[in-house]
Amino acid sequence: MTSRCLPCRTQEMNCTRNEECCQGLCVWGQCAKDVRKGQNGTICENQGDCSKGTCCAIQSSLLYPVCTPLATEGKRCHDSLSQNELLDLIWEFDPDSALDYCPCADGLKCQARWGNLFLTCERPPNKGKGQGNKI
């Protein structure tokens, strides 16, 4: 088997690895300059590769993990405290690995809603004063 060198890819050309880009990094599948590793859309291998407010999640459209913004209200999410024992075992084995979905952003809770087959980020119920139970 022989291999050959290929020219590097310029800005906005499709990529799957940082090394393919002439300058900068591969971001959301395209070469981009003026980007730092760990920012939104940059390729990651584990959670430690991503900046605050993002997580390392596998993107089905890209087939590899990138730093992805934390899930917002109504979006699918990852719950590290899930009741699924098999997923919990996998998570404990490699807690820094890439996820299918990110945890929820601050102020939201990852939970199953009635009728949903998956977890989504929801606002926790308001338990403020004057919100007592009515009979």
Image: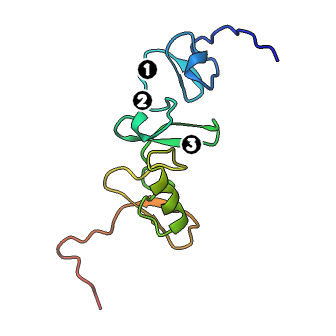
User: In terms of sequence position, does the residue under pointer 3 or pointer 2 come before the other?
Assistant: 2
Query: According to the image, label 1 marks what residue?
Result: 35
Q: Work out how far the residue at label 1 is from the one at label 2, CA to CA, in angstroms.
A: 7 Å
Residue 123 in picture, x, y percent from top left? 36, 61
Residue 103 in picture, x, y percent from top left? 42, 52
- Residue in the image at 17% along x and 73% along y: 129
- Residue in the image at 44% along x and 59% along y: 79
**Image quadrant occupied by the N terminus:** top right
Query: According to the image, label 2 marks what residue?
Result: 39
- Residue in the image at 52% along x and 30% along y: 43
Judging from the image, what secondary structure is the residue with disc 3 in?
strand
Does residue 74 appear anywhere in the picture? Answer: no
In depth, the one of 53 and 43 nearer the eye is 43
Give the vertical position of 134 relative to 54 (above or below). below
| Mark carried by residue 57 | none
**Which residue is outermost to the left?**
129
Residue 16 in picture, x, y percent from top left? 62, 26
Residue type at mark 3? Answer: Ile
| 125 on left or right of 60 | left
Query: According to the image, label 3 marks what residue?
Result: 58
Give the vertical position of 42 relative to 35 (above or below). below
- Residue in the image at 75% along x and 10% along y: 4
| 81 on left or right of 62 | left
Q: Work out how far the residue at label 3 is from the one at label 2, CA to CA, in angstroms.
A: 15 Å
In depth, the one of 5 and 100 nearer the eye is 5
